[in-house]
Amino acid sequence: MWIYEKKLEYPIKIKNPDPAMAKVIITQYGGPDGELAASLRYLSQRFSMVTPQARAILNDIGTEELAHLEMIGSMVKQLTKNATIEQIKEAGLDAYYADHDKGVYPVSAAGVPFTAAYIAVKGDPVADLTEDMAAEQKARATYEWLINLADDPDVLDPLRFLREREVVHFQRFGEALRIVQDFLASQKIFAVVMPEVH
Amino acid sequence: MKNSVMGMPGTQHDLPGITRDAAWRDGKQGRCTCIPQETSIDCVMLATAYVPFQKFCGTWPPLRSLLAGTVFPELFSPYCKREYVNLEPEVTCGKNPLGGGCHHE
Amino acid sequence: MNRDAILTELMELDFMLVDLQLFLDTHPCDQDALKQYNDILAKANVLREQYESLCGPLYSFRSFNRGHWEWYRDPWPWQYSFNVDLPGEECR
């Protein structure tokens, strides 16, 4: 089960509102390669893993992704707080504002609402872990694009932190895949039928 | 060698069990004594993906870890926008910027 | 120590624990990593106690609340005033 700890994994302290930045950063909240997709994917896939190391890694990285989801939500909130209607319109956030005010709703940068279609739970541990490695690379790339779009150090620091976490997660999923592959290979029993020799 | 604790001037916190960078290196030449990954894999099979296992060679101190986004220097992959700023990671044993080629002494 | 200093150090140590924990999940037999994890945990637990006695509960159903229910009080972690500025710079 989950316990909530009343602090962020990395501090978010954004002094200057920037709705334009909020509009793109929200993609790591509700977008295809965002933290909601990641946490739901890993926490769902963990049930079909076949070794305790893989179960642990999926459980624990899934949990960390929830902490990242919280960071992204905090960033969006702080970036729009005190923003004027003029700033919101200029940032192209007026359509979002019409439906959500300055609330945090899971959508991509283009405004597409979150869907479970972003994740797969194949039930096959090799397929699932391979998908997880791809997911981490996509998240890492998305953070790079967001870093390219940002200028404010208060925004850049947490984005770089989150990007590095994806790199580390990729390594861990890769190791989990090794462990699972070794396990599955050791389970194979080959029946060799001796040919009849006359 | 791997787990000696050395106080360095100006470090944030002195925690037991944390390996300082200098402990990896043998003498002034800086020959590596701990390579943080396996450098060969037995029994590689077709149609199978392999990520080399990391090996524990110590960590950065607490503040550096949080700022970098990892405790492990060997997993640090700096990204400084379009213009790549050449940040010395301070402590890697050998020259292996992530993705930059084989790990060697 | 003031609240900001304790919170900063606690964030640093707790982060180390998170990263080490993931390493240990795939390297469960690594004694060096385990020792470091336990050593850091001991220090973090001391800080946790200091933080809670200064600033109130960190956990919603694992922490004591003194005199009255403190858990619900502001600031919450997503609010600006909760957070600290980290010293140091990473590639500007």
Image (cartoon, rainbow, N blue to C red):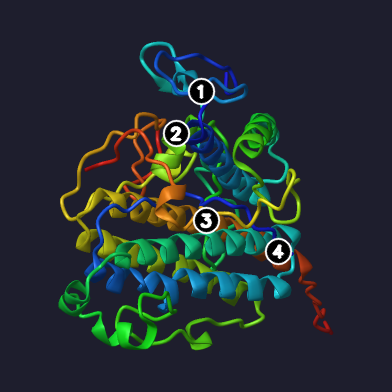
Quadrant the N terminus of chain B occupies: top right
- Within 10 angstroms of label 3, few (less than 14), some, or many (20 or more) residues? some
Badges 4 and 2, same chain: no
User: What crowding class fits label 4: few (fewer than 14 Cα within 10 Å), some (14-19), or many (20 or more)?
Assistant: some
Q: In this picture, is B18 found above or below A155?
A: above
Mark closer to the observer (3, 4): 3
Mark 3 element type: loop
Would you name the residue on which mark 3 appears?
C76
Mark 2 element type: helix
Image quadrant of residue B2?
top right
Helix, strand or loop under label 4:
helix
Q: Which mark is residue B92?
A: none
Q: Label 2 lies in what chain?
A: B
Residue type, mark 2 in image: Leu
CB under 8 Å between callouts 2 and 1? yes
Residue C30 screen position, x and y as percent: 68, 38
Q: Which amino acid, mark 4?
A: Arg
Residue type, mark 3 in image: Trp
Residue identifier under label 1: B13
